[in-house]
Image: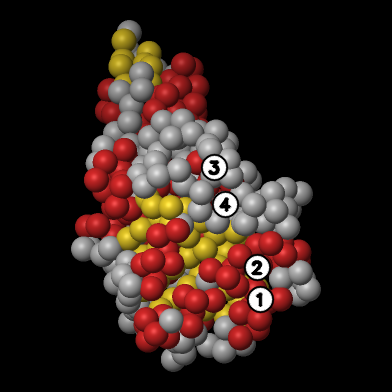
């Protein structure tokens, strides 16, 4: 629980650890409860009931487990699962754009989510949804720690290896401020309490992107890879043509590798759409499913958001419990042969 409740005079109270809460639903519920209590005299049992309702809403304190749906029997698993997160372009700016011939070739050859939407603006809430199953914040300049369940925690609990490969990261395990073209708002793992309190885990898990080519060449990729280009290569400050060239240079070798062709899954997505596109929270974005087990030339019409990507990444790694909204998110099994 991330707050303490103090009652005086029958119905006064204060949330004396509210500063630590990052969940918007929690803040709304606390506000409504305060307003109600200020205008009603409640029995002790009803006050207790309201307290329990507030306590049941997560606020970044790593409380109770999220609701869970079982993984479908038709969900394939893979030896290596990776996601690449690009930046700030809507679906219509990407799919069919002649400036991105490589990405579009993948979209035509493999699976394309034709109704995929980011969860919010700006960037960081979407990165948290991809890893925590909650947006956690409404800003990019968040400070503090996120202690909710997360991908790193679930992978570690399941005995699965993982790494976050971050281009321009100053050093392994770095969790400090921006050092351009690296920005912390694109590195959600740096906020996790699991890593802030465990320096060896952070050093092993948060690594500069230069390590990716070495691990690929040495057949040492982890089960789960979270790949983040820097601000010039992710489409944020550079052009889409630059982002496409980066993908072809760095991701094409992954796809063609023996390990990937044997048992690999790659998801390429964008954190959010154009700022003017607020459909379903963060706008429509291009998301592509690449795998030897993926249906060829498949375009899905099902609505998905980043919590489904989080669920797919973990389920495809053999993990069966999921953080936050990923616990009940729509499964993406339709992209794979046999479904």
Residue position marked by numbered label 2 in the rendering: 245
Residue position marked by numbered label 4 in the rendering: 230
Number of other residues with Cα within 10 Å of mark 3, as a class: few under 14, some 14 to 19, many 20 or more: some
Looking at the image, residue 50 lies above or below residue 199: above
Tell me the CA gap for discs 3 and 1: 26 Å
Snapshot quadrant of residue 79: bottom left
Q: Dot 2 lies on which element?
A: helix
C-beta proximity under 8 Å, tags 1 and 2: yes
Residue 224 visible, this angle: yes
Tell me the CA gap for discs 4 and 2: 13 Å
Name the N-terminal-most of marks 3 and 4. Answer: 3
Looking at the image, residue 313 lies above or below residue 236: below
- Render colour scheme: secondary structure
The percent coordinates of residue 214 (x first, y second) are 39, 66
Tell me the CA gap for discs 4 and 1: 19 Å
The percent coordinates of residue 180 (x first, y second) are 58, 40
Name the N-terminal-most of marks 2 and 3. Answer: 3
Name the N-terminal-most of marks 4 and 2. Answer: 4
The percent coordinates of residue 91 (x first, y second) are 70, 65
Q: State the quadrant of the N terminus.
A: top left
Tell me the CA gap for discs 1 and 2: 8 Å
Number of other residues with Cα within 10 Å of mark 1, as a class: few under 14, some 14 to 19, many 20 or more: some
Number of other residues with Cα within 10 Å of mark 4, as a class: few under 14, some 14 to 19, many 20 or more: many
Q: Dot 4 lies on which element?
A: loop
Residue position marked by numbered label 1 in the rendering: 102
Snapshot quadrant of residue 304: bottom right
Residue 74 in the figure: left or right of residue 282: left
C-beta proximity under 8 Å, tags 3 and 4: no
Residue position marked by numbered label 3 in the rendering: 183
Residue 156 in the figure: left or right of residue 55: left
Tell me the CA gap for discs 2 and 3: 21 Å
The percent coordinates of residue 280 (x first, y second) are 64, 55
């Amino acid at each position: 629980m991330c707050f303490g409740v103090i009652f005086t005079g029958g119905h006064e109270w204060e949330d004396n650890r509210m500063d630590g809460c990052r969940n918007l639903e929690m803040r709304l519920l606390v506000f409504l409860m305060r307003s109600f209590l200020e205008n009603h005299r409640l029995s002790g049992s009803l006050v207790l009931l309201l307290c329990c309702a507030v306590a049941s809403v997560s606020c970044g304190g790593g409380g109770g487990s999220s609701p869970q749906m079982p993984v479908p029997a038709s969900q394939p698993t893979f030896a290596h699962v990776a996601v690449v997160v690009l930046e700030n372009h809507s679906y219509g700016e990407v799919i069919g754009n002649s400036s991105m011939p490589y990405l579009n070739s993948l979209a035509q050859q493999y699976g394309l989510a034709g109704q995929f939407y980011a969860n919010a603006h700006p960037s960081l809430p979407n990165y948290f949804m991809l890893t925590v199953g909650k947006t956690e914040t409404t800003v990019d300049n968040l400070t503090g720690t996120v202690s909710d369940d997360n991908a790193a925690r679930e992978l570690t609990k399941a005995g699965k290896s993982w790494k976050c490969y971050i281009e321009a990261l100053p050093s392994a395990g770095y969790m400090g401020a921006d050092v351009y073209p690296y920005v912390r708002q694109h590195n959600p793992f740096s906020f996790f309490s699991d890593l802030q309190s465990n320096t060896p885990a952070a050093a092993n898990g948060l690594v500069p992107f230069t390590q990716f080519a070495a691990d690929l060449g040495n057949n040492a990729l982890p089960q789960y890879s979270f790949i983040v280009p820097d601000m010039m290569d992710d489409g944020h400050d550079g052009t889409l043509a630059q982002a496409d060239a980066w993908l072809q240079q760095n991701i094409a070798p992954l796809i063609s590798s023996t390990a990937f062709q044997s048992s690999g899954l790659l998801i390429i997505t964008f954190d959010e759409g154009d700022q003017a596109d607020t459909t379903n929270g963060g706008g429509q974005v291009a998301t592509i499913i690449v795998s030897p087990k993926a249906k060829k030339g498949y375009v899905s019409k099902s609505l998905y958001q980043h919590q489904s990507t989080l669920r797919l990444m973990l389920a495809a790694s053999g993990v069966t419990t999921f953080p936050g909204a990923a616990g009940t998110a729509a499964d993406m099994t339709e992209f794979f042969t046999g479904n």
